[in-house]
Amino acid sequence: MKILVLNCGSSSLKYQLVDMETEAALARGLVERIGIENSRLVHETDAGKVEMNEDIPNHQVAVQLAIDALISPEYGVISDVKEISAAGHRVVHGGENFSEAVIIDGEVKKAIAECSTLAPLHNPANLVGIEACERILDVKQVAVFDTAFHQTMPDKAFMYALPYGLYEKYKIRRYGFHGTSHKYVAARAAALLGRPLDELKLISCHLGNGASVCAIDKGLSVDTSMGLTPLEGLIMGTRAGDMDPAAVTFIMEKERLSPGGMEGLLNKTSGVLGISGLSSDFRDLEAARNEGNEMADLAIKMYCYRVAKYIGAYAAAMNGVDGIIFTAGVGENGSMVRREICEYLGFLGVSLDEEKNAKRGVEIDASAEGARVRALVIPTNEELTIARETLALVK
Ligand code: AMP
Protein backbone atom coordinates (compact mmCIF):
# COMPACT_ATOMS: atom_id res chain seq x y z
CA MET A 1 0.00 0.00 0.00
CA LYS A 2 1.29 3.47 -0.89
CA ILE A 3 0.19 6.59 0.93
CA LEU A 4 0.58 10.15 -0.26
CA VAL A 5 1.44 12.54 2.58
CA LEU A 6 0.75 16.22 2.00
CA ASN A 7 1.68 19.31 3.94
CA CYS A 8 0.17 22.46 2.42
CA GLY A 9 1.38 25.91 3.40
CA SER A 10 -0.06 29.17 2.14
CA SER A 11 2.25 29.19 -0.91
CA SER A 12 3.92 25.83 -0.66
CA LEU A 13 3.20 22.12 -0.81
CA LYS A 14 5.44 19.39 0.57
CA TYR A 15 4.68 15.82 -0.41
CA GLN A 16 5.99 12.33 0.16
CA LEU A 17 4.89 8.99 -1.23
CA VAL A 18 5.42 6.34 1.45
CA ASP A 19 5.49 2.60 0.79
CA MET A 20 3.82 1.16 3.88
CA GLU A 21 5.37 -2.28 3.44
CA THR A 22 8.86 -0.91 3.98
CA GLU A 23 7.89 2.49 5.48
CA ALA A 24 10.36 4.04 3.03
CA ALA A 25 9.72 7.32 1.23
CA LEU A 26 9.68 6.43 -2.48
CA ALA A 27 9.67 10.08 -3.50
CA ARG A 28 9.48 13.45 -1.84
CA GLY A 29 9.01 16.92 -3.18
CA LEU A 30 8.43 20.56 -2.56
CA VAL A 31 6.35 22.99 -4.58
CA GLU A 32 7.24 26.58 -3.76
CA ARG A 33 5.86 30.01 -4.57
CA ILE A 34 2.35 28.75 -5.46
CA GLY A 35 0.40 31.69 -6.85
CA ILE A 36 3.54 33.82 -7.00
CA GLU A 37 5.89 34.33 -9.95
CA ASN A 38 8.90 32.00 -10.36
CA SER A 39 7.10 29.03 -8.84
CA ARG A 40 8.91 25.70 -8.95
CA LEU A 41 8.71 22.06 -8.04
CA VAL A 42 11.67 20.04 -6.76
CA HIS A 43 11.05 16.29 -6.92
CA GLU A 44 13.46 13.82 -5.36
CA THR A 45 13.79 10.04 -5.55
CA ASP A 46 16.63 7.58 -4.93
CA ALA A 47 17.56 8.14 -8.58
CA GLY A 48 18.15 11.87 -8.06
CA LYS A 49 16.55 15.28 -8.06
CA VAL A 50 14.62 17.12 -10.78
CA GLU A 51 13.57 20.74 -10.71
CA MET A 52 10.70 22.12 -12.75
CA ASN A 53 10.16 25.84 -13.11
CA GLU A 54 6.69 26.64 -14.31
CA ASP A 55 3.62 28.68 -13.60
CA ILE A 56 1.80 27.18 -10.59
CA PRO A 57 -1.21 29.45 -9.99
CA ASN A 58 -2.92 27.49 -7.22
CA HIS A 59 -2.79 24.41 -4.97
CA GLN A 60 -4.89 22.32 -7.34
CA VAL A 61 -2.24 22.75 -10.05
CA ALA A 62 0.46 22.06 -7.45
CA VAL A 63 -1.14 18.77 -6.35
CA GLN A 64 -1.62 17.77 -9.98
CA LEU A 65 2.04 18.52 -10.75
CA ALA A 66 3.18 16.49 -7.76
CA ILE A 67 1.09 13.53 -8.93
CA ASP A 68 2.35 13.95 -12.51
CA ALA A 69 5.89 13.80 -11.14
CA LEU A 70 5.07 10.64 -9.17
CA ILE A 71 3.74 8.84 -12.28
CA SER A 72 6.21 10.32 -14.76
CA PRO A 73 7.84 7.60 -16.94
CA GLU A 74 11.12 9.54 -16.58
CA TYR A 75 11.44 10.28 -12.86
CA GLY A 76 8.28 8.78 -11.37
CA VAL A 77 8.06 5.95 -8.85
CA ILE A 78 4.63 4.51 -9.74
CA SER A 79 3.04 3.81 -13.10
CA ASP A 80 -0.55 4.68 -12.28
CA VAL A 81 -2.25 7.12 -9.93
CA LYS A 82 -4.42 4.18 -8.77
CA GLU A 83 -1.37 2.86 -6.90
CA ILE A 84 -1.95 5.66 -4.36
CA SER A 85 -4.28 4.07 -1.78
CA ALA A 86 -4.90 7.04 0.53
CA ALA A 87 -3.80 10.58 1.31
CA GLY A 88 -2.76 11.88 4.73
CA HIS A 89 -2.74 15.61 5.37
CA ARG A 90 -0.90 17.56 8.00
CA VAL A 91 -3.43 19.95 9.51
CA VAL A 92 -2.02 22.50 11.91
CA HIS A 93 -4.94 23.35 14.19
CA GLY A 94 -7.66 20.98 15.33
CA GLY A 95 -8.74 23.10 18.29
CA GLU A 96 -10.45 21.07 21.01
CA ASN A 97 -12.31 19.00 18.43
CA PHE A 98 -9.62 16.49 17.56
CA SER A 99 -7.47 14.44 19.89
CA GLU A 100 -6.51 12.03 17.13
CA ALA A 101 -6.36 11.68 13.36
CA VAL A 102 -9.67 11.36 11.50
CA ILE A 103 -10.99 10.41 8.07
CA ILE A 104 -11.92 13.61 6.30
CA ASP A 105 -15.59 14.23 5.51
CA GLY A 106 -17.78 17.32 5.24
CA GLU A 107 -18.05 17.72 9.02
CA VAL A 108 -14.28 17.47 9.49
CA LYS A 109 -13.68 20.06 6.77
CA LYS A 110 -16.16 22.37 8.48
CA ALA A 111 -14.34 21.94 11.80
CA ILE A 112 -10.96 22.63 10.16
CA ALA A 113 -12.41 25.79 8.60
CA GLU A 114 -13.77 26.87 12.01
CA CYS A 115 -10.29 26.50 13.51
CA SER A 116 -8.96 28.96 10.91
CA THR A 117 -9.56 31.83 13.33
CA LEU A 118 -6.93 30.19 15.57
CA ALA A 119 -4.47 29.43 12.73
CA PRO A 120 -5.22 31.90 9.94
CA LEU A 121 -1.95 31.27 8.11
CA HIS A 122 -2.15 27.49 8.15
CA ASN A 123 -5.65 25.99 8.30
CA PRO A 124 -7.05 27.66 5.15
CA ALA A 125 -4.02 26.38 3.19
CA ASN A 126 -4.45 22.88 4.65
CA LEU A 127 -8.10 22.92 3.56
CA VAL A 128 -7.24 24.08 0.05
CA GLY A 129 -4.81 21.14 -0.23
CA ILE A 130 -7.47 18.69 0.97
CA GLU A 131 -10.00 19.98 -1.54
CA ALA A 132 -7.49 19.99 -4.38
CA CYS A 133 -6.68 16.36 -3.58
CA GLU A 134 -10.36 15.48 -3.42
CA ARG A 135 -10.82 16.66 -6.99
CA ILE A 136 -7.82 14.76 -8.31
CA LEU A 137 -7.63 11.53 -6.32
CA ASP A 138 -10.45 9.10 -5.67
CA VAL A 139 -9.13 7.89 -2.29
CA LYS A 140 -9.89 8.27 1.39
CA GLN A 141 -8.18 11.23 3.01
CA VAL A 142 -7.06 11.56 6.60
CA ALA A 143 -6.31 14.69 8.64
CA VAL A 144 -3.47 14.45 11.18
CA PHE A 145 -3.45 17.44 13.52
CA ASP A 146 -0.38 19.14 14.98
CA THR A 147 -2.44 19.93 18.07
CA ALA A 148 -3.96 16.45 18.64
CA PHE A 149 -1.13 14.94 20.71
CA HIS A 150 -1.38 17.78 23.23
CA GLN A 151 -5.08 17.28 23.95
CA THR A 152 -4.04 15.15 26.94
CA MET A 153 -2.66 18.22 28.77
CA PRO A 154 -4.46 18.86 32.07
CA ASP A 155 -6.37 22.13 32.47
CA LYS A 156 -3.76 23.50 34.89
CA ALA A 157 -1.28 23.37 31.98
CA PHE A 158 -3.47 24.52 29.12
CA MET A 159 -5.41 27.37 30.75
CA TYR A 160 -4.17 30.98 30.68
CA ALA A 161 -4.82 33.04 33.81
CA LEU A 162 -7.24 35.34 31.99
CA PRO A 163 -10.90 35.94 32.84
CA TYR A 164 -12.44 32.47 32.44
CA GLY A 165 -15.16 33.84 30.15
CA LEU A 166 -12.56 34.38 27.41
CA TYR A 167 -11.90 30.66 27.33
CA GLU A 168 -15.63 29.94 27.18
CA LYS A 169 -16.25 32.56 24.50
CA TYR A 170 -13.23 32.16 22.20
CA LYS A 171 -11.50 28.96 23.39
CA ILE A 172 -8.40 30.98 24.27
CA ARG A 173 -6.02 28.39 25.77
CA ARG A 174 -2.76 26.57 25.12
CA TYR A 175 -3.08 24.06 22.28
CA GLY A 176 0.54 23.29 21.45
CA PHE A 177 1.97 22.28 18.07
CA HIS A 178 4.59 19.91 16.56
CA GLY A 179 2.51 17.12 18.17
CA THR A 180 3.22 14.65 15.37
CA SER A 181 6.96 15.16 15.84
CA HIS A 182 6.92 15.00 19.66
CA LYS A 183 4.87 11.79 19.51
CA TYR A 184 7.18 10.14 16.97
CA VAL A 185 10.44 10.95 18.77
CA ALA A 186 9.02 9.89 22.15
CA ALA A 187 8.22 6.44 20.73
CA ARG A 188 11.70 6.23 19.19
CA ALA A 189 13.29 7.32 22.47
CA ALA A 190 11.60 4.43 24.29
CA ALA A 191 12.92 2.03 21.64
CA LEU A 192 16.42 3.52 21.90
CA LEU A 193 16.40 3.27 25.69
CA GLY A 194 14.93 -0.23 25.54
CA ARG A 195 12.17 0.69 28.00
CA PRO A 196 8.37 0.86 27.67
CA LEU A 197 7.12 4.35 26.80
CA ASP A 198 4.52 4.17 29.58
CA GLU A 199 7.29 4.01 32.19
CA LEU A 200 9.20 7.05 30.94
CA LYS A 201 9.29 10.77 31.67
CA LEU A 202 10.63 12.48 28.56
CA ILE A 203 11.26 16.07 27.51
CA SER A 204 11.23 16.49 23.76
CA CYS A 205 12.90 19.56 22.24
CA HIS A 206 11.79 20.12 18.64
CA LEU A 207 14.30 22.77 17.59
CA GLY A 208 13.71 23.72 13.97
CA ASN A 209 12.76 26.98 12.36
CA GLY A 210 9.79 26.80 14.67
CA ALA A 211 10.67 25.33 18.05
CA SER A 212 8.82 23.84 20.99
CA VAL A 213 9.45 21.73 24.08
CA CYS A 214 7.05 19.06 25.29
CA ALA A 215 6.79 17.25 28.62
CA ILE A 216 5.77 13.66 27.90
CA ASP A 217 4.77 11.55 30.88
CA LYS A 218 4.07 7.85 30.14
CA GLY A 219 3.69 8.67 26.43
CA LEU A 220 1.21 11.52 26.96
CA SER A 221 1.80 15.23 26.45
CA VAL A 222 1.32 16.93 29.82
CA ASP A 223 2.67 20.36 28.89
CA THR A 224 4.19 22.14 25.92
CA SER A 225 5.73 25.52 25.24
CA MET A 226 3.71 26.68 22.24
CA GLY A 227 0.33 28.10 23.10
CA LEU A 228 -2.78 29.39 21.40
CA THR A 229 -0.53 29.91 18.38
CA PRO A 230 3.00 28.74 17.52
CA LEU A 231 4.41 32.06 18.79
CA GLU A 232 4.69 31.28 22.50
CA GLY A 233 7.58 29.61 24.27
CA LEU A 234 11.08 29.24 22.92
CA ILE A 235 13.03 31.82 20.98
CA MET A 236 12.80 30.67 17.35
CA GLY A 237 14.35 31.56 14.00
CA THR A 238 12.14 34.62 13.55
CA ARG A 239 9.62 34.34 16.43
CA ALA A 240 10.02 36.03 19.80
CA GLY A 241 8.53 33.35 22.05
CA ASP A 242 7.75 34.27 25.69
CA MET A 243 7.77 37.92 26.73
CA ASP A 244 5.84 40.35 28.89
CA PRO A 245 2.49 40.95 27.12
CA ALA A 246 2.66 44.56 28.30
CA ALA A 247 5.68 45.05 26.02
CA VAL A 248 3.41 44.22 23.08
CA THR A 249 0.94 47.04 23.74
CA PHE A 250 3.84 49.39 24.60
CA ILE A 251 5.56 48.73 21.24
CA MET A 252 2.27 49.02 19.34
CA GLU A 253 1.67 52.42 20.88
CA LYS A 254 5.21 53.76 20.44
CA GLU A 255 5.75 52.39 16.93
CA ARG A 256 2.14 53.01 15.88
CA LEU A 257 1.67 49.41 14.84
CA SER A 258 -1.64 47.77 13.97
CA PRO A 259 -2.41 44.30 15.42
CA GLY A 260 -1.33 42.80 12.08
CA GLY A 261 1.89 44.85 12.08
CA MET A 262 2.71 43.77 15.61
CA GLU A 263 1.98 40.14 14.79
CA GLY A 264 4.36 40.43 11.84
CA LEU A 265 7.08 41.88 14.07
CA LEU A 266 6.72 39.09 16.64
CA ASN A 267 6.52 36.29 14.07
CA LYS A 268 8.79 37.36 11.25
CA THR A 269 11.45 39.80 12.39
CA SER A 270 12.11 38.70 15.97
CA GLY A 271 13.79 35.57 17.37
CA VAL A 272 17.47 34.94 16.68
CA LEU A 273 17.09 36.94 13.45
CA GLY A 274 15.85 39.96 15.36
CA ILE A 275 18.57 39.75 18.01
CA SER A 276 21.49 39.06 15.68
CA GLY A 277 20.25 41.28 12.85
CA LEU A 278 21.95 38.66 10.70
CA SER A 279 20.07 35.44 10.05
CA SER A 280 17.47 33.02 11.36
CA ASP A 281 19.67 30.09 10.33
CA PHE A 282 21.91 28.57 12.99
CA ARG A 283 24.58 27.68 10.45
CA ASP A 284 25.04 31.40 9.71
CA LEU A 285 24.91 32.32 13.38
CA GLU A 286 27.51 29.74 14.39
CA ALA A 287 29.83 30.86 11.60
CA ALA A 288 29.39 34.51 12.63
CA ARG A 289 29.96 33.70 16.31
CA ASN A 290 33.18 31.87 15.40
CA GLU A 291 34.31 35.05 13.64
CA GLY A 292 33.66 37.06 16.80
CA ASN A 293 30.21 38.50 16.00
CA GLU A 294 28.82 39.49 19.43
CA MET A 295 25.19 39.75 18.39
CA ALA A 296 25.24 36.23 16.92
CA ASP A 297 26.83 35.08 20.16
CA LEU A 298 24.10 36.79 22.21
CA ALA A 299 21.33 35.28 20.06
CA ILE A 300 22.69 31.74 20.51
CA LYS A 301 23.22 32.25 24.24
CA MET A 302 19.65 33.53 24.71
CA TYR A 303 18.28 30.66 22.62
CA CYS A 304 20.05 27.92 24.61
CA TYR A 305 19.25 29.54 27.96
CA ARG A 306 15.53 29.59 27.13
CA VAL A 307 15.51 25.91 26.10
CA ALA A 308 17.36 24.96 29.31
CA LYS A 309 14.85 26.91 31.43
CA TYR A 310 11.96 25.01 29.87
CA ILE A 311 13.68 21.68 30.45
CA GLY A 312 14.12 22.60 34.13
CA ALA A 313 10.47 23.62 34.37
CA TYR A 314 9.21 20.43 32.76
CA ALA A 315 11.42 18.24 34.93
CA ALA A 316 9.64 19.90 37.86
CA ALA A 317 6.22 19.53 36.20
CA MET A 318 6.77 15.75 35.89
CA ASN A 319 8.69 15.40 39.17
CA GLY A 320 11.63 13.92 37.29
CA VAL A 321 12.91 13.11 33.83
CA ASP A 322 14.53 10.05 32.25
CA GLY A 323 15.50 11.41 28.86
CA ILE A 324 15.84 14.65 26.93
CA ILE A 325 15.28 14.40 23.19
CA PHE A 326 16.73 16.77 20.59
CA THR A 327 15.10 16.80 17.18
CA ALA A 328 14.42 18.90 14.01
CA GLY A 329 16.97 20.99 12.06
CA VAL A 330 18.86 22.58 14.96
CA GLY A 331 18.23 19.75 17.45
CA GLU A 332 19.46 17.07 15.05
CA ASN A 333 22.43 18.93 13.58
CA GLY A 334 23.48 21.57 16.06
CA SER A 335 25.98 19.80 18.31
CA MET A 336 27.14 23.14 19.69
CA VAL A 337 23.59 24.15 20.65
CA ARG A 338 23.00 20.76 22.30
CA ARG A 339 26.21 21.12 24.27
CA GLU A 340 25.36 24.63 25.37
CA ILE A 341 21.87 23.58 26.52
CA CYS A 342 23.14 20.50 28.36
CA GLU A 343 25.76 22.58 30.21
CA TYR A 344 22.88 24.01 32.27
CA LEU A 345 21.53 20.56 33.12
CA GLY A 346 24.31 18.89 35.09
CA PHE A 347 22.22 19.25 38.26
CA LEU A 348 19.58 16.99 36.70
CA GLY A 349 22.10 14.28 35.85
CA VAL A 350 22.63 15.18 32.18
CA SER A 351 26.15 14.71 30.85
CA LEU A 352 27.15 14.55 27.18
CA ASP A 353 29.75 12.37 25.52
CA GLU A 354 31.46 14.86 23.20
CA GLU A 355 32.32 12.28 20.55
CA LYS A 356 28.77 10.95 20.35
CA ASN A 357 27.35 14.47 20.43
CA ALA A 358 29.39 15.38 17.35
CA LYS A 359 27.49 12.81 15.21
CA ARG A 360 24.83 14.08 12.84
CA GLY A 361 21.64 12.78 11.24
CA VAL A 362 21.49 9.47 13.16
CA GLU A 363 19.57 8.29 16.21
CA ILE A 364 22.00 8.33 19.08
CA ASP A 365 22.14 8.34 22.86
CA ALA A 366 24.74 11.10 23.19
CA SER A 367 25.09 10.70 26.97
CA ALA A 368 28.30 10.05 28.80
CA GLU A 369 28.63 6.66 30.46
CA GLY A 370 26.55 6.50 33.64
CA ALA A 371 24.59 9.74 33.05
CA ARG A 372 21.39 9.56 35.11
CA VAL A 373 19.29 11.42 32.53
CA ARG A 374 19.89 10.44 28.91
CA ALA A 375 20.40 13.03 26.14
CA LEU A 376 19.05 11.58 22.91
CA VAL A 377 19.34 12.86 19.35
CA ILE A 378 16.46 11.53 17.25
CA PRO A 379 15.78 12.68 13.67
CA THR A 380 12.06 13.37 13.45
CA ASN A 381 9.82 11.85 10.78
CA GLU A 382 6.47 13.60 10.75
CA GLU A 383 5.60 12.25 7.30
CA LEU A 384 5.98 8.64 8.41
CA THR A 385 3.78 9.29 11.45
CA ILE A 386 1.12 10.85 9.20
CA ALA A 387 1.37 7.86 6.82
CA ARG A 388 1.04 5.38 9.72
CA GLU A 389 -1.97 7.16 11.19
CA THR A 390 -3.56 7.34 7.74
CA LEU A 391 -3.00 3.62 7.19
CA ALA A 392 -4.49 2.77 10.59
CA LEU A 393 -7.70 4.61 9.68
CA VAL A 394 -8.17 3.50 6.07
CA LYS A 395 -7.20 -0.14 6.52
P1 AMP B 1 13.63 22.60 10.31
O1 AMP B 1 12.58 23.65 10.54
O2 AMP B 1 13.49 21.42 11.21
O3 AMP B 1 13.77 22.20 8.86
O4 AMP B 1 15.04 23.27 10.72
C1 AMP B 1 15.64 24.26 9.93
C2 AMP B 1 16.76 24.91 10.69
O5 AMP B 1 17.72 23.91 11.10
C3 AMP B 1 17.61 25.88 9.86
O6 AMP B 1 17.03 27.13 9.78
C4 AMP B 1 18.90 25.89 10.64
O7 AMP B 1 18.82 26.91 11.63
C5 AMP B 1 18.97 24.56 11.31
N1 AMP B 1 20.05 23.72 10.77
C6 AMP B 1 20.06 22.97 9.66
N2 AMP B 1 21.26 22.37 9.49
C7 AMP B 1 22.05 22.74 10.53
C8 AMP B 1 23.39 22.46 10.94
N3 AMP B 1 24.18 21.66 10.22
N4 AMP B 1 23.83 23.04 12.09
C9 AMP B 1 23.04 23.84 12.82
N5 AMP B 1 21.77 24.14 12.48
C10 AMP B 1 21.27 23.61 11.36
Image: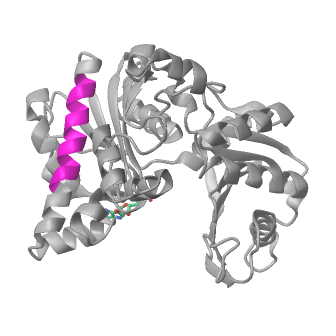
Picture coordinates of residue 310, whole percent (x, y): 25, 34
Nearest the camera: 367 or 155? 155
Picture coordinates of residue 193, whole percent (x, y): 33, 31
Q: Quadrant of ligand 1?
A: bottom left
Quadrant that contains the C terminus: top right
Instruction: Please tell me whether residue 341 is drawn above or below residue 68 in the rendered image.
Output: above
Picture coordinates of residue 278, whole percent (x, y): 27, 72
Residue 77 as seen in the image, left or right of residue 188: right
Residue 205 as seen in the image, left or right of residue 45: left
Predominant SS along the magenta part: helix
Q: Can residue 342 be spotted in the picture?
A: yes
Nearest the camera: 46 or 13? 13
Quarter-wise, where is residue 44 in the image? Answer: bottom right
Q: Residue at x 52, y 17 (%)?
A: 165
Residue 141 as seen in the image, left or right of residue 231: right
Q: How is the image coloured?
A: one colour
Quarter-wise, where is residue 352 in the image? Answer: top left
Residue 384 as seen in the image, left or right of residue 72: left
Q: Residue at x 69, y 50 (%)?
A: 124
Q: Indicate whether residue 92 is drawn in magenta.
A: no
Instruction: Please tell me whether residue 256 is drawn above or below residue 31 in the rendered image.
Output: above
Instruction: Please tell me whether residue 220 is drawn above or below residue 35 in the rendered image.
Output: above
Q: Can residue 364 be spotted in the picture?
A: no
Q: Residue at x 65, y 42 (%)?
A: 116
Quarter-wise, where is residue 391 in the image? Answer: top right
Looking at the rendering, the stretch of residues picked out in magenta corresponds to 301-315
Picture coordinates of residue 72, whole percent (x, y): 80, 75
Task: Give the number of marks.
Answer: 0
